[in-house]
Amino acid sequence: MISRAAARHAFWKLGFMLRTGAPAWSLCAYLRCNALRRLSGRSSPDGTNYEEARDDFRRYLKHLTIESDWFTDGIPAILRAVDIAGLKERDALNCLEIGSWQGVSACFFLRSLGQARLTCVDTWEGSDEHRNGDAASPQVLATVEAVFDTNTSAFSGRITKRKGTSLSFYQASTERERYDLIYVDGSHRSDDVIVDAVNCFKMLADGGVLIFDDYFWTYYEAELENPASAINAFLRMKRHRLEILSFDYQLIVRKRPGGARREQA
Ligand SMILES: C[S@@+](CC[C@H](N)C(=O)[O-])C[C@H]1O[C@@H](n2cnc3c(N)ncnc32)[C@H](O)[C@@H]1O
């Protein structure tokens, strides 16, 4: 039986999606994914237990310096999407992360995908919520980059650090750079999220997986300033090139091939 509080929260989420411009097809995908999510947490079609993998990674984190875990709840959905997209079968994976903080998500990708190289883009100056003291103390913020370096040192051969804003990273990237998996968890202001969405989509290989964190985040008072409004605008723009693999607090999509010019008659 679903509790009254859970039902109220579920209705709030649907209302939030409508107010922030979620297209009807994404609402359907959200409802479908959430019915399936209860099953997917338990086991995959091939019997892999994603929750076990999440718990194993949580044990690994105990050996690192971690102030906050904002990531591991999403692990079962990410692993399931990685399996659906067949990423583990590829010989080499080129991965990109926008927003690394102390390195929790980076360590997860590098540890779970042994054949992956990961580029981490971050200012290591924190987002609004860190600088305002809501999500991190000044002491934690002051040491965040050094902590990231220490936490990820076990993977130094497969990690590339790019310090700066994501916008400066896109501007410096070559036209041909392509990634198989991209995780977007940088600035959560809708203005920045739309820039990340459009640029990351461009840099995503056909068949690649794009993960947006914090869809239901409501830090900014005006609902439209939060990530959802930007993600929804992106969904409307790129519907024909997207397949939703998972949709809850994180939205995970796969890029369909396409984008060719129409033949002139
Ligand atoms: C929520 S944290 C990332 C958490 C991390 N993925 C994890 O799992 O622990 C957001 C990060 O984005 C970074 N950031 C904020 N604005 C940015 C921007 N415009 N470009 C690049 N990074 C940014 C912050 O410095 C912060 O480290």
Image: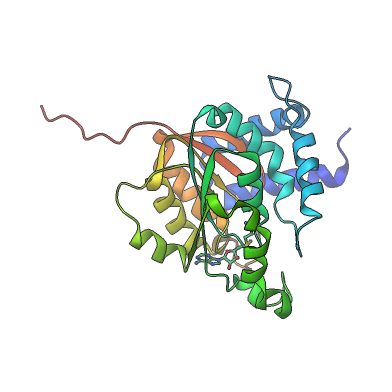
In percent of width and height, residue 242 lies at 45, 35
Q: Is residue 216 visible?
A: no
In percent of width and height, residue 97 lies at 53, 53
Q: Nearer the viewer, residue 144 or 159?
A: 159
Give the quarter of the image for residue 4: top right
Q: Is residue 15 visible?
A: yes
Q: Nearer the viewer, residue 11 or 220?
A: 220
Q: Does residue 183 appear left or right of residue 153 in this picture?
A: left
The N terminus - image quarter: top right
Residue furthest top as drawn: 46
Q: Nearer the viewer, residue 127 or 222?
A: 127
Q: Does residue 109 appear left or right of residue 204 in this picture?
A: right
Give the quarter of the image for residue 263: top left
Q: Residue at x 34, y 62 (%)?
A: 171
In percent of width and height, residue 31 lies at 65, 33
Q: Is residue 206 above or below residue 186?
A: above
The C terminus - image quarter: top left
Colour scheme of the picture: rainbow
In percent of width and height, residue 172 lies at 34, 62
Q: Residue at x 86, y 36 (%)?
A: 2
Residue furthest left as drawn: 265
Give the quarter of the image for residue 37: top right
